[in-house]
Amino acid sequence: MKQMHYSIQANKYTSPSLVITGRKKTLKHSFVYLTSGLILCRLGKLEYAIEPTQAFWLPFDCLSAWTVFPDTQYYKVEISARVSTSLPDESGYVKADEWLKSLLEKITMIKPAETIYQHYSYVLLDTLRDITPKLVSTTLSKRISTWTPDSSVFANDGRTNDILLAREIKKSILSGKKESEIIHSLFHDSEKNYHKIHNSYLDKPDNT
């Protein structure tokens, strides 16, 4: 397979700020392995929480939206839809063993232009070909999916509740709502609480 290093991209990311993406179809196959923090992947009406040491697979042309919590570190592998290798066509959690984790660590430390990168790309592709994604709703995923601004789902986890509120603010802004409407609907007219959440999570350069 020619130009394998262009067909597979593996990177390690650190997200200091909240990142929110709109729902769109994936242009490549994607594999995510989380080392710290929290990532949410929305598929259909449900959200799937990816926690530390968990891995998640998304095939090409899958409609999804992502929320990356602040202070999250993760590996992400993107594979061109044009590769001839047969890859899983279902989304879901993947068991990441020590071999796969070691492979991710090694390949992300090598520049794609280096000859050895192509060797690791072949090995990584061969490894991901054999994964078996399982789409199950974990305990945290269920809590996230049932959360509403007025719920007490995360009464004992103020940070998660605040980040989900920040995401709702972002959605409301993008839908064209005025600030006064957002404060009324999400914060029961408390400007103080609104500005606290907005300033903490949405006034950051990494937010999208």
Image (cartoon, rainbow, N blue to C red):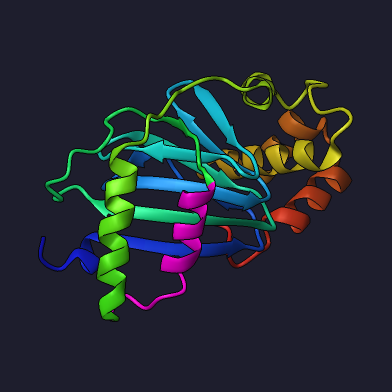
Report the label total: 0
Question: Majority secondary structure of the magenta segment?
Answer: helix
Q: Nearer the viewer, residue 105 or 171?
A: 105
Residue 146 location (% of width, % of height): 66, 18
Residue 20 location (% of width, % of height): 54, 48
Does residue 118 appear left or right of residue 40 in this picture?
left
Residue 140 location (% of width, % of height): 68, 26
When the figure is inspected, residue 164 is found, relative to residue 107, above or below; the finding is above
Does residue 156 appear left or right of residue 32 in this picture?
right
Q: Residue at x 32, y 64 (%)?
A: 120
Q: Which residues are magenta?
A: 98-113
Q: Residue at x 13, y 50 (%)?
A: 82
Q: Nearer the viewer, residue 30 or 109?
A: 109
Q: Nearer the viewer, residue 82 or 142?
A: 82
Q: Residue at x 69, y 58 (%)?
A: 71
Tell me if residue 196 is in the magenta stretch. Answer: no
Say which quarter of the image contains residue 133: top left
Tell me if residue 109 is in the magenta stretch. Answer: yes
Does residue 144 appear left or right of residue 48 in this picture?
right
Does residue 59 appear left or right of residue 157 in this picture?
left
Say which quarter of the image contains residue 129: top left
Q: Residue at x 24, y 68 (%)?
A: 5
When the figure is inspected, residue 180 is found, relative to residue 83, above or below; the finding is above
When the figure is inspected, residue 180 is found, relative to residue 121, above or below; the finding is above
Q: Residue furthest bottom?
A: 114
Quarter holding the N terminus? bottom left
Q: Nearer the viewer, residue 148 or 153?
A: 153
